[in-house]
Image (cartoon, helix red, strand yellow):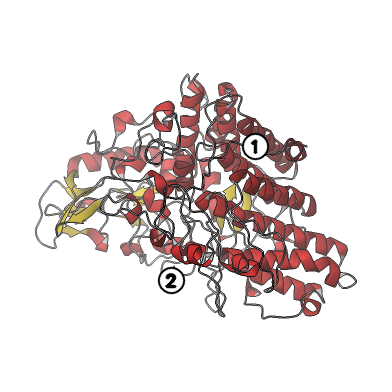
Amino acid sequence: MKTNRILYIIISCGLLFSGCSDEFLKEKEMYQQATEQQVFSTETQTNLFISNIYYKFFNSYTRPDESLVGLYSIDMGYSSLTEEKGGMSQLINNQYTLSKASDCSTYIGAPITQSVANSPYTRIRECNYLLDNIDTYGKGNLDSTFIVQAKGQMLVLRAMQYFDLLRMYGGVPLVTKYTQASDTTKLLRASVTACVSQILTDLNTAAGYLPAQWSNVSTDYGRLTSAAALALESRVLLTYASPIFNTDWNNTADPRWTEALAVSLKAEKKLTAAGYGLYGSSITDWDNMFQQGSGGSKTFNKEALIIRLCSGNTSMTSQVSNGWENAIRLKSQNGSGGISVPEEMVDIFPMADGSSTAANSMIKNGSLTFFLNRDPRFYRTFAFAGSQWNSGTGSVTDTVWAYRWMNGSYYTGSNSVSSPVFVRKMSYAKADLTNITYSYTDIMDYRYAELLLNIAECYAATNDVPDCLAYIGKVRARVGIPSANNYGLGNITDKNAAIAACLKERQIELAYEGKRFWDIKRWLLYDGGQGTPQLSTTNTCTALGVNQLNGTSRTGVWLTTQSTGTAKSDPLIALRSKVVPADPTSSSFSSQLSSLATFYQNNFKYVALSTPMDNNTVSGKTQAATISWLSRYYMWGFTLSILNDDTWFTQTIGWLDANSSAGTFNYQDTNNISDSLVSTLEN
């Protein structure tokens, strides 16, 4: 296979994004083939080329809960493989066993044809094109600062693409030069450590090329920055230190953890000095953070380290709007129906003082007052019957009702949800519900809060539990959780218990932001890494004191009326008109919740779903199902088309190659990045 073909097709997997101002978005049209002299003739021409590369990386990023560079609406639906949503897919359904190269995800692309697809190595190739040519052909035409900043953006983009390839496939071929069709050099899979070293080198170089903030917010906000590069270094090293790649993860002196900590602290220091930080100091600020920029006004958001700016301009030929608002709004609000929240996700959120919710479990303890006295983020992440979910459209009710009667046969307002709780996070309070297909709300792929939680996890892994709890405390303090008893976390002294606390806090703070699957994966939380092939000598779930996901299911119930009612006649229609909706923005919110709790206790009960939230079909019959993830799924193998075209590639361990032989590529290499690179990153 020719090297340029590798550029277009080899493996890929997904991560971040970036955005840009409305004006910049308008430029994101396919840039036609042109000579180097044309591409680098003026800043306008070069910016068009750069804009097209951004377009290819991020145009499909139209909702926050899925994240893969270049292709975000993926067939596997990774957020459905976590506690955040119910529903079985092939990867967690025991009715399917994937093991052959032909079973692997086609996200990696196919061998190049005359019609070039927008695939990982195509995007890498275009980054390399600019990096290799702009100095030569831009000299005399382009300002020197413009050239450096253009190169910085390409380096971050290339690093992002390689990181997603790494997370999905382990070691992949590294192509860092723009290649011609005549080049037939065979590239082998690089080791994980080699890939990490290249990614970090790109990011470190880019951090020196790019501004921490773009001076012209109106035209450049959303482009990648040095802040993005520094934060990504933290994310990459955190993943590299985690059990998915690190056999020595349980060693407190492991250099990967100490390096991740040092680099993350450096990023925190530099980003704080550049004006980044947690947005606000209250739960209202926390909620408003996601809405900043909604309505079309784009301004700097101090928490957004990488942001995908969206536009509600329906006349634009390219879709750049956020589809999340439509996805989460209920049918009664003219949305697509909402996202029902499994009990397992509801129960993750603590009480108002930060303590465990065990006694207030929605289904396990049959609590109809599950919404009382919860973490302030609970009310901005979820909605429930009788809660106020604002909009800017007076013709659509702001109070949502979603319950059933006649044992579940009928339901309110077309709201056929399978849980009393549904997602409202990242909703725009002034959304026009008469047309929410196009939403302005920006998508943050990387927030400052995530960086703080990265630091907390590194502190825990290096056995500095007090500092770990202090950093989790920063995230909790911002939303109003009191500091008593370590912000409700309790007296944690064991490093692995502290790591577990970090992972749980990420579930809460970063819920529905496309992060949970990657945390489950890097910590092997489906089976503790004990499947075939075995990935860790220590069961990660046992070590952390958490339940593995295999063998569990996401559960829901119907909220139904206690009175039976009659067909199509809502028995609570008169009573509910007297209920004061619980509005989280109101100063009377606490009393509103108390009144709503009384209404629940007097009028509602739970009824089992007619079809379980997690189910599969066996012998033509639908039945309850539990999660069943195989260890080989932690890292994909190469597809059959790739292996047939590039016979020198070794298949990933756990997968069969083109000849049905067992894969041999081991992505858990024991090498570490060089001391010289570590020194560069830390200084």
Q: Is residue 637 above or below residue 135?
A: above
Q: What residue type is labelled 2?
A: Asn
Image coordinates for residue 513, horizontal then vertical, percent: 49, 50
For marks 1 and 2, the one nearer the N-term is 2
Q: Can residue 353 be seen in this view?
A: yes
Crowding at label 1, few (<14), some or many (≥20) Cα neighbours within 10 Å? some
| Residue 88 x, y percent position in the rendering | 30, 53
- Name the residue tied to disc 2: 435
* x then y, percent, for residue 471: 58, 31
User: Height in image: 205 above or below 539?
Assistant: below
Marker disc for residue 402: none
Q: Is 55 placed left or right of 108 in the picture?
A: right
Q: Distance between the residues labelled 1 and 2?
A: 52 Å
- Whether 582 is drawn above or below 496: the answer is below
Quarter residue 214 falls in: bottom right
Element carrying mark 2 = loop
Q: Which amino acid does label 1 sit on?
A: Asn
Residue hosting label 1: 672
Q: How many numbered marks appear?
A: 2
Residue 423 visible in the current orientation: no
Residue 337 image offset from top left, x and y in percent: 33, 62
Q: Which of 17 and 564 is in front in this view?
A: 17
Tell me the quadrant of the picture where the C terminus can be found: top right
Instruction: Left or right? Give the position of 576 relative to 125.
Output: left
Residue 117: quadrant of the picture: bottom right
* Camera-nearest residue between 145 and 158: 158
In the image as oriented, which residue stretches furthest toward the right? Answer: 140
